[in-house]
Image (cartoon, rainbow, N blue to C red):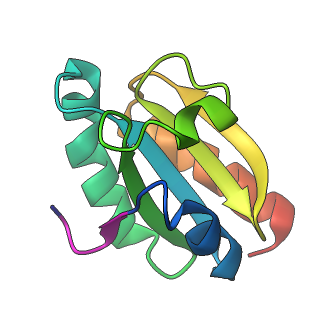
Amino acid sequence: MNTNIYKISDKNFSEKITEEKKLVLVDFWADWCNPCKVLMPILEEISIKYKEKVIFYKINIDENPNTAPKYSIRGIPTLLLFHKSNLIATKVGSISIFELEEFLNLHIKELSI
């Protein structure tokens, strides 16, 4: 796993999204999910490019079954974008690197980060 993408769990989820000053992107995924595997190299590349403005986390829904239902996650991969612990955007399904950059740039611009 890329060092710019950190694992989080049910236990530390709230703490991690609350303490960050940057945007926080959380990838909800599972080992058996093929679209999740397709998305991983895209996230790795983007995490390097956006490391100054966004912190990247991933949470395995099989190992951490309590957090996904709190955000009504029904399909994976799901990306949740937080700012100052508030959920500001969601993307469901595998997306291209272009779509992910567009998604992040929109919110970075809106929040003047």
Q: Position of residue 60 (x, y in %)?
A: 33, 42
Question: What residue is shown at x 19% (from left), y 66% (from top)?
Answer: 2
Q: Position of residue 35 (x, y in %)?
A: 27, 22
**Residue 6 on the magenta segment:** yes
Q: Which residues are magenta?
A: 2-7
In this image, 23 relative to 37: left or right? right
In this image, 42 relative to 102: left or right? left
Q: Position of residue 48 (x, y in %)?
A: 32, 70
**Residue 3 on the magenta segment:** yes
Quarter-of-image position of residue 56: bottom left
Question: What residue is shown at x 66% (from left), y 25% (from top)?
Answer: 72
Question: What residue is shown at x 27% (from left), y 32% (from top)?
Answer: 30
User: Is 47 or 32 nearer to us in this picture?
Assistant: 32
In this image, 2 relative to 63: left or right? left
Depicted 112 relative to depicted 56: above or below: below
Q: Dividing the image into 4 quarters, which one contains the C terminus?
A: bottom right
User: Is 96 or 15 nearer to us in this picture?
Assistant: 15
Depicted 64 relative to depicted 21: above or below: above
In this image, 89 relative to 55: left or right? right
Q: Dividing the image into 4 quarters, which one contains the N terminus?
A: bottom left
